[in-house]
Amino acid sequence: MQYSTVPRVTAHDPFKDFPGSESQFKSMLNTSIAHFPAATTMKLFTFFLLVASTLLELTQGEKICSATDSVYSFKFGKWDATVLKDGVIRGLESFFANVPSFAVLRNVRFYDPTSNFEASQNMLLLRNRRDVVLIDTGSGESLIRLLRVVGVAPREVTAVLLTHLHGDHSKGLLDKTGNAAFPNALVHMHRLESEFWSRPAADIGQQYPNLPFELAINETVTTLTKLKKLYAGRIRLLNDLESPIRGVTAVLTPGHTEGHTGYMLRSSGKKLMVVGDTLVSRTTVIQHPEWAIISDTNATTVVRTRYDLMDKLADEKTQVLLYHDEFPGLGFIVRDGPSFDFSTVARVA
């Protein structure tokens, strides 16, 4: 087994294919021009000016992606896959209900000394000849812009698969004017997720008094109400192990929410699982599955789900996309003695 680190998006270097330095290139160009008549020199100058301007456009275009560090494309079997980063959520240390902030800070800082204590929002875009699929939509801050960067118009999206309905995963289904962002897409979610958040917010708050009412309950109920209206006739409710898209299987992973769902992707012998908020990030619930997130609907259930899921992912060496880990969030769950860890090393056969 060979290993290679996950590559990063980098800006194009227009001189990298030339066997020499930039100064050597310019010296050769000057020498060559000196031996040509004026008319020929002018034509050459015009040609090189055109090439240079084209290279500048390409370089600047690629630097947009590199500078924002928000687009990471890779091949997954027959799919063209892209991780899109819809900004960050700050204040990672305050995410947890049963762990003091200083303990979270200490663990994160120990394993990642440069951490800004931010949680990325890593959405997955999948494209083939038939489908354009989004798994989660972020909070809607940057999604439409990022789709345009990679050449996808909102009307081209054929399906949206939601891991759950919390706002940082579902609000990207609404555009800036409050209308449906994807006019031709079917929206898939687990049946239990829809049923749970279709109840009155006050009833849920009474049953789950420890959940932040406005952020975790009222906003989620309100979002679902809007989605039912805007995507009327286009919402599809899933059962466990159902396949909304060929090669994609919905896997119920309850606890964070009642109908929280992961998506197992299979193509050309490869496997990748999108785990949503069941496994938030390496330095939090992967290393400490017992840590309860403030928005976990059922903390006891989610801890059991985390252990069962990580056991399976580690044993089967399945690649994973973490929604809130450092962009792009791709790697593998690995065993660390009796515990677990997350490796951002890509395994290459």
Image (cartoon, rainbow, N blue to C red):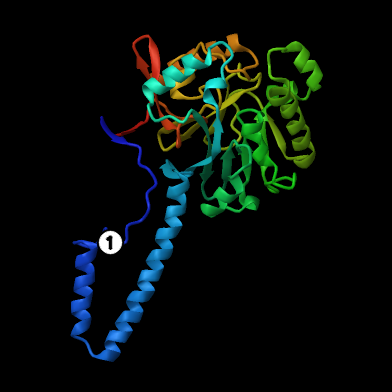
Q: Nearer the viewer, residue 236 or 228?
A: 228
Horizontal arrangement in the rendering, residue 200 relative to residue 213 (left or right):
right
Horizontal arrangement in the rendering, residue 103 relative to residue 94 (left or right):
left
In percent of width and height, residue 57 lies at 43, 64
Instruction: Give the residue at the far front of this rendering.
Output: 102
In the rendered image, which quarter is residue 314 located in?
top left
> Which residue is identified by label 1?
15
**Image point 72% across, 23% down: which residue?**
217
**Image point 81% across, 22% down: which residue?**
200
**Residue 312, visible in the rendered structure:** no
The secondary element bearing badge 1 is classed as: loop
**Residue 159, visible in the rendered structure:** yes
In the rendered image, which quarter is residue 90 located in?
top right
Q: Nearer the viewer, residue 241 or 324?
A: 324
Horizontal arrangement in the rendering, residue 239 relative to residue 283 (left or right):
right
In percent of width and height, residue 59 lies at 40, 59
**Which amino acid type is shown beneath numbered disc 1?**
Phe
Does residue 112 sit above or below 84 in this rendering?
A: above
